[in-house]
Image: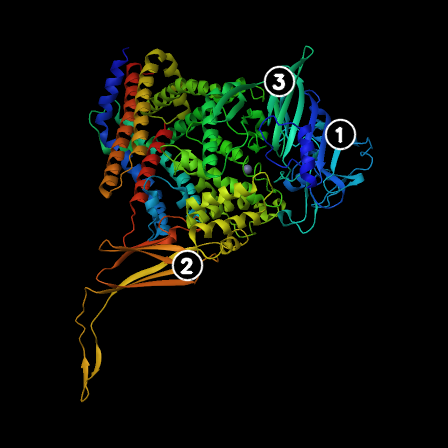
Amino acid sequence: MVLSGLFYVLQLLYPQIINPKPLSQRITNYKLEVELDPVAKTVSGTMDAFWVNPSSDVVPDIQLHMYLNAFSSNKSTFYKESDGSPGTEEIDYGWVKIKSMTDRKGNDLKSIMKYISPDDNNPDDMTVLDVPLPEAAKPGDTVFIKVSFVSKLPTLTHRTGFKDDFFFVGQWFPKFGVYEPAGMRYAVKGGWNCHQFHYNSEFFSNHSVYDVKITVPKEYVIGTGGILLDEKGEGEKKKTQTWRAEDIVDFAWTAWPGFAVYMDQWKHVKITLLLPKDRSEQVDRQFTAVKYALEYFDKNVGPYPWPYITIVDPPKKGNGSGGMEYTTIFTSESAYWMPEYFKFPEMVTIHEFGHAYFMGILASNEFEEPWLDEGVNSFWEERILDHYYGPDAGMLDHPFLKVSDETMARMEYVLSGNRQVVSNAEYSWNYPHRTYGLMSYMKTATWLYTLMGIVGEETTNEIFKEYYRKWAFKHPSGRDFVNIVNEVVPRINGNKFGPDMNWFFDQTLYGTGICDYKVSNFFNSSITDFKGIVNTGDSILFKKSGREKDTLFKATVQLERLGEVMLPEEILVHFDNGDHILETWDGKSRFKDFKYTGKRKVDWVKIDPDYKIKMDVNYINNSMTDNPDKKPVRRYANKFISFMQFFINIISL
Amino acid sequence: MSIIYPIISGAVRSIKSIKGVLAIWLSTLFLVSLVAIPMKSSIDAVLGLSMITEKLKNGINFDVLADFGTNLPAILSAAVSGILLLVLSGFLVNVFFNGGLFTTLRNGEEKYSSAQFFRSAGTRFWPFLLITGIMSIMVLASLLLIFGIALGIAGSSDSSPEGARFRAVIIGGLISVFLLPIFLLVVDYARVWQVTSSKPDGFKAIGVGFRQTFKHFFSSYPVMFINMLIQALFGWFVLKFISGYGPQTGGGIFLLFLLSQFLFILRISLRVWRYGSVTAMYENHPV
Ligand SMILES: [Zn+2]
């Protein structure tokens, strides 16, 4: 094939340094040489980059992300979506300016390039650049560009920028969009998939090699998504570091004189942690959390393929950059005083690390399918936190109050008045009523838990292992994920859930319904002997009887489906003699009755006794008993009374 | 003057006033129950015949809170307004009873008399409200000032280290701990003076409170500080006990109720002990 021959050449140009073999196709590659000006708040320099036409199309142009331009005005799509503005002073604004751009032959491209807004036709948005090629790219052709550029960083409020002498440099250089050949992610025909910078999404790129030379003042400590190959001084006051990264979808870096650097190791992975010097007591927490995540993903999804990871715990003034993922570098969010029982830093670290898998390795399109990125990742984040920090204590582990991470997501979904406004399968900027987070994080995680409740934990892990095996370093779509589920579940469970799981995804991912099952009632009536007219042949006899056989009962259990979503349910019926029966119900009809005749009476009934169907928006009506346990509430009432008595007494001097 | 005498004398006086202590206990219990019982009933009503309470056995469970659904905001807003009313009325009731207590704590009162207790509570109500109200505001304002200044010195600029702010809060807390006894001495001396004076005059009482506090600072402060230290230790123990004790049986819950009420009575007695000590100190150097 054209491609493989070409890749051989490219591999000579870009010899392997980090891993023995390329992990990805490396359709795009970048060589950057830049200098940070800490006074002007700019990063300027040159970029040599190429893109290989992976399709059988003749492609007349290239498209580039120019994402810092999102911070150039309050009319950019980013700020229109957020209803804000980059700031009040000129220094607050960010932009990227191309000083020159040429192709391999030295043809000027700057004069023919133009900004486009494929998502919303916003004339004021300048985050996507279209560059017509002097010669269209034939299948397999490599398009080289040489760019000289200046990136002015914005004041750090969202993800990228500066605050005083702290810099987090993300989405900072002209970067290729993804050319999708027909068939890739079910595209009907080939074309550029290059979205504008949006308030809620920013990632979809090819896996690339990055060679980046960064010059900064000597006192700055740098962290990047690569490994450091070389450092040399530039006169008295500056230094230049050479960094290398392979097979990642974005290259970000940070520079700040106030960082302390810590190192740790997990198996083959060297972990670097950069955090403010006076936050050293948080070091162990961060290392522990990321090692938990490495272990859990390695065991249940697939290996972490790079030999390093860099964690940045930004200072308070740099909080705007906290909680961001750039695959081999990510930012956590913590504070000097963060108490041990509050697992927020762990949550952010595990979540952002998780994006190395969901987005980094499994490079789905965050713009078009945020659930496949954020939602799937939240599901794993919740599993990891609740696994390692306690099933009820993944978020908060205090003697007074414990909260699991999974519960937080479910609560947000269940309590939201907008939970039915839209389906889960929307472009990130199309979620109405500010439901982006609710849908793509919370609801997705909740139905993934529900799926795990139905098919079991082992099958779920197998789904993700297969997803990894098949799609690592490629660009899966939601349908590709569903196809994996449809393949793995019947392979393990046979026909137990039907030939495929489309019924599940149609209702959860693509549907807007809610799930709510209810025990309407149960009652026990005693069975009496025959009473009525007995026709003996010659005479009519009225048998009054009714000596009641009070030892025999007919017990009836009445269930109801209140929501639109139909999911298989288990029902635990308990009898007064201690017996219990576990029934199953496909959950499809509006109601379901179970009847039992015998010497025993039903005394309680539970739908979904193990709370597997997390999507059920009301657990209270899932059970009914003759004898409700009021003690826990009474205990809390007691404690409330004591607390209030003491409180009033104390404030009364 | 020895600091031992007022401590012992205060304790004796507080034991003598046990009926006043019990009156405060009962009235507070009654008031709090007025809010707590309807709140409990509405929660019970939402839970109905459900078995979800099994999830509440080990503590508050957010899953269950989520399932309250639309009931949750209703219950929460009722709770918030209930608690506000409760705090306000509880404060007033305490002001009222303190009028009685300070009277019966005086040395002249050989025997506790309920009639005198309530009569005095009634006649001292307005000046006591003034004294307690103004001093509460002063305490609040100085706390705000202390923490505000501490944080200001630590640097509100983004470049100051985070640890500095944390340490500022700690230092602010320490200063408050040492300052609080002074305010308590003032408010107690003011009330002692008020019950000895036939004329209700809250402002003058506060003036006397300040004067007495600083005039006899080195004998008064240790007495107050020791009492506060004991109360703090006691409070810490109560918090540990009440939050840590999670009985699962009906009997256990009743025992929790009895024990926590007993602890509350002890807490009131400790406070009355403080009042008694200040009364004793005042009687040594009356104005
Ligand atoms: Zn995320």
Subunit ID for the residue under disc 1: A
Q: In this rendering, is residue A475 above or below B94?
A: below
Q: Residue at x 31, y 16 (%)?
A: B223
Callout 3: few (<14), some (14-19), or many (20+) C-alpha neighbours within 10 Å? many
Q: Quadrant of ligand 1?
A: top right
Q: Is residue B150 visible?
A: no
- In primary-sequence order, the first of circles 3 and 2 is 3
The residue at which mark 1 appears reads as A147
- In primary-sequence order, the first of circles 2 and 1 is 1
Mark number displayed over residue A220: 3
Q: Is mark 3 on a helix, strand or loop?
A: loop
The reply, left or right, for residue B84 in relation to residue B256 is right
Work out whether residue A611 or residue A532 is closer to the camera in this orientation and state it.
Answer: A611
Subunit ID for the residue under disc 2: A
- Note whether ligand 1 is within 8 Å of mark 3: no
Work out whether residue B2 or residue A637 is closer to the camera in this orientation and state it.
Answer: A637
State the separation of the CA atoms marked 1 and 3: 26 Å
Picture quarter containing residue B64? top left
Mark number displayed over residue A586: 2
Is the image coloured rainbow, by chain, by secondary structure, or in one colour? rainbow
State the separation of the CA atoms marked 3 and 2: 62 Å
